[in-house]
Each structure stands twice: as structure tokens, then as C-alpha cells.
Image (cartoon, rainbow, N blue to C red):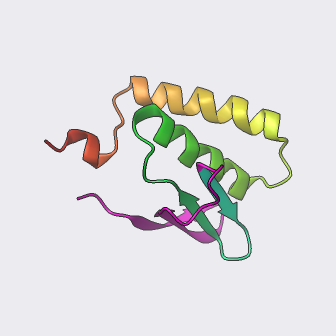
Amino acid sequence: MAKRSARVYIGDQRWTIQITKSLAPDRDGECDYDARTIRVHPSLQGEDLLEVIVHEMLHARWPDLSEEAILEHSQEIAGTLYRLGFRHEEEHDG
């Protein structure tokens, strides 16, 4: 089984990225500035998982960037990384 959390630097701040079900039912991901934690729903896979992680990391790094800009950039970045072969470990299992 793949890791369910990781400690990373976003800008000069240390953040935790968690794969967890502890999200509002209508959310795939969230960026908690106070706790410096990004939470991502475990049902996500493939390019969708990559896009949500990138999306929330962009929120963490540039909190004043518009949602429209975040969406555009996260889709571009995730799509490119996915086409280059970046995958979540669980996608390679089995």
C-alpha cells in the first residue's frame, strides 16, 4: 500500500499532504492554511488525483491567486505530468 501522507516544502513552509476521507462530502481536496495541511480524498486516481494535489499545492503556495487561475494551471500541470508517465504507486500495484 502506498503512503497515506507526506511532509513537503511548499515555498519555504513545511506542509503535510494527507490522503484521507476526512473531507466534506462535496470536496475532493482542501488546503488548510492554519494547519499547513492538504487533504485529498482517497477515491481519486490517475490524472484526477494528480490534478487535485497540484491544485491544492498551488493554493498553498499562492493563496491570493484566483480560483480560475488555479484551475487552469493545475489542469495543465497535471495533464502534462500524467502524459509524461507520473503515477501514484497504487496504480502500479497488481
- Nearer-the-camera pick, 51 or 13: 51
Coordinates of residue 72 in the picture (x, y in percent)? 71, 29
- If the image is split into quadrants, where does the C terminus sit? top left
- Nearer-the-camera pick, 44 or 9: 44
- As drawn, 18 above or below 63: below
Considering every residue shown, the one lying at the far front of the view is 25
Q: Is residue 41 shown left or right of residue 31?
A: left
Res. 51 image quadrant: top right
Q: Is residue 85 shown left or right of residue 18?
A: left
- If the image is split into quadrants, where does the N terminus sit? bottom left
- As drawn, 7 above or below 76: below
Considering every residue shown, the one lying at the far left of the view is 94
Res. 73 image quadrant: top right
Q: Residue at x 38, y 64 (%)?
A: 4
Q: Residue at x 58, y 48 (%)?
A: 28
- Nearer-the-camera pick, 94 or 59: 94
Considering every residue shown, the one lying at the far bottom of the view is 35
Residue bounds of the magenta highlight:
1-28
Q: Residue at x 47, y 63 (%)?
A: 20
Coordinates of residue 76 in the picture (x, y in percent)? 60, 26
Coordinates of residue 14 in the picture (x, y in percent)? 58, 72
Coordinates of residue 17 in the picture (x, y in percent)? 51, 63
What is the total number of numbered labels drawn onto the structure image?
0
Q: Residue at x 71, y 34 (%)?
A: 71
Q: Is residue 7 magenta?
A: yes
